[in-house]
Image (cartoon, rainbow, N blue to C red):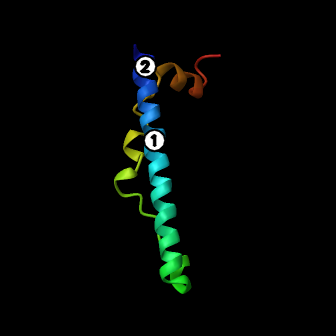
Amino acid sequence: MANDHKRELRERKRQLKRKGNQRVRRILKRGLAEDPENAADLAADYGRYRSADLNGLDADPARREQALGNIP
């Protein structure tokens, strides 16, 4: 049951990252077409497609202990 929830969270994060990358590519292409001289100065803005809010939601205590070296 818990694995299904973690799998769902990970899939949602993948979808958000994919949408964000598509959005940024579209914005950069548009900027290059409209103003080629200043296209290098455009900043990536992910907007509502940021996945930072989902970081660490699927943290597994066993993995955390293994990363710390408590479990062989």
Estimate the x, y position of residue 64 in percent, counting from the top left. 51, 26
Estimate the x, y position of residue 32 in percent, counting from the top left. 53, 77
Hey, which residue is sitting farthest top in the picture?
Answer: 1
How many C-alpha atoms fall within 10 Å of the one at disc 1: few (<14), some, or many (≥20)? Answer: some
In percent of the image, x 42 and y 63: which residue is there? Answer: 45
In-front residue for pair 63/30 = 30
In-front residue for pair 6/21 = 21
Is 26 positioned to the left or the right of 70 in the image?
left
| Residue type pointed to by label 2 | Asp
In percent of the image, x 58 and y 22: which residue is there? Answer: 66
Q: Earlier in the sequence, mark 2 or mark 1?
A: 2
How many C-alpha atoms fall within 10 Å of the one at disc 2: few (<14), some, or many (≥20)? Answer: few
Q: Secondary structure at mark 1?
A: helix
Of circles 2 and 1, the one toward us is: 1
In percent of the image, x 52 and y 70: which residue is there? Answer: 29
Which residue matches tag 1?
15
| Separation of residues labelled 2 and 1 (CA atoms) | 16 Å
Image quadrant holding the N terminus, namely top left
Is 23 positioned to the left or the right of 40 in the image?
left
Hey, which residue is sitting farthest bottom in the picture?
Answer: 37
| Residue type pointed to by label 1 | Gln
Estimate the x, y position of residue 3 in percent, counting from the top left. 45, 18
Compared to residue 10, the image places residue 71 above or below, namely above
Query: What mark, if any, has residue 52 been given in the picture?
Result: none
Query: What mark, if any, has residue 4 been given in the picture?
Result: 2
